[in-house]
Image (spheres, rainbow, N blue to C red):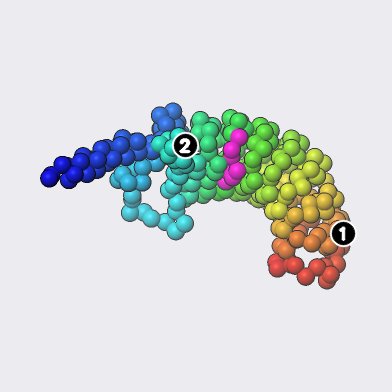
Amino acid sequence: MFFPWCLTLSLTVLICSVNLGYAATLVTDEVEALKQIAKTLGKKNWNFNVDPCRHDEPSWFTHTEDIRVNQVNQVECDCSFYNNTTCHVARIILKRQSLGGKVPPELFRLPYLIEIDLTRNYLNGTIPREWGTMQRLARISLLGNRVTGGLPIELANISTLLNLTLDYNQLSGNIPPQFGDFSSLEKLSLISNNLTGELPQSLAKLTTMKDFRISDNNFSGNIPNFIESWTSLRRLEIQGSGLSGPIPYGIASMANLSQLRISDLKGNESTFPLLRNNSNFKNM
């Protein structure tokens, strides 16, 4: 008489045990990588006594009373591997965390990473060449740090990269010709650095470019005509860049361009193209 009830209870306990036993967890190699990344960044409030990817566990970072506007402290995982039992780190977003360490080369040890966002910290050091081996990476932002050195040519090996934002740092040197090899890049933003040299002709190959910003640098040479070939371009900012005119007339007829800022060109006064036939402009 009681057998069906007991059987049901036994099955329930068994199912619960199976679910608990196969809860998705972050692979050990990536846990160890996060420990080293935290050390390099100067990140002290990650709690490695819990799994970074287990949302049902207590928070793996310690909250502080100093909560700032637009502050983000996020490690996002993809736990869809091996029947939802295995996790890999997909995104690291640490905005306004007052991090005073260095830009961590160890991020390359997270092979499934698609986004690195370390916006508005106090990080120093250089952009790691090791990042060029990350073949799933789509977005990098180091905006508003103290990063020095040049732009590593190895970054151009990241065929999946869509967005490279490096504004407000202390980067120097030229834009490498290899940056023309980006096959998917849609945004390149280098505002307020110490970059020099002419824009390499190889950038003409960046036909997927939608957003290009190079204001407040020390470039030389003329605004290149190849910008006219970026038919997907929506935003262009060249203010106090060090470049000289003339402004390519073809810019006025770019069908998708809606935000255009060009000013403080070197050399002789440059005539601005007539824009009355382009109704897309929102900001000039």
Q: Which mark is residue 81?
A: 2
> Judging from the image, what secondary structure is the residue with disc 1 in?
helix
Few, some or many residues within 10 Å of mark 2 (<14, 14–19, 20+): few
- Find the distance from the CA under tag 1 to the CA under tag 2: 51 Å
Q: 38 and 269: which one is in front? A: 38
Nearer to the camera, 170 or 272: 272
Residue 249, label in figure: 1
Residue depth check, mark 1 versus mark 2: number of the one nearer the observer = 2
Q: Is residue 187 magenta?
A: no
Q: Secondary structure at mark 2?
A: strand
From the viewer's side, name the closer residue of 219 and 30. 30
Q: Which residues are magenta?
A: 135-141
The kind of residue tagged 1 is: Tyr
Indicate whether 122 appears above or below 38.
Answer: below
Which percent across, then down, holds residue 68?
42, 56
**Looking at the picture, which amino acid does disc 2 mark?**
Phe
Q: Quadrant of residue 201?
A: top right
Q: Quadrant of the C terminus?
A: bottom right
Query: Neighbour class for label 1 at 10 Å: few (<14), some, many (≥20)?
Result: some
Residue at image location 85% in from the left, 67% down from the top: 274
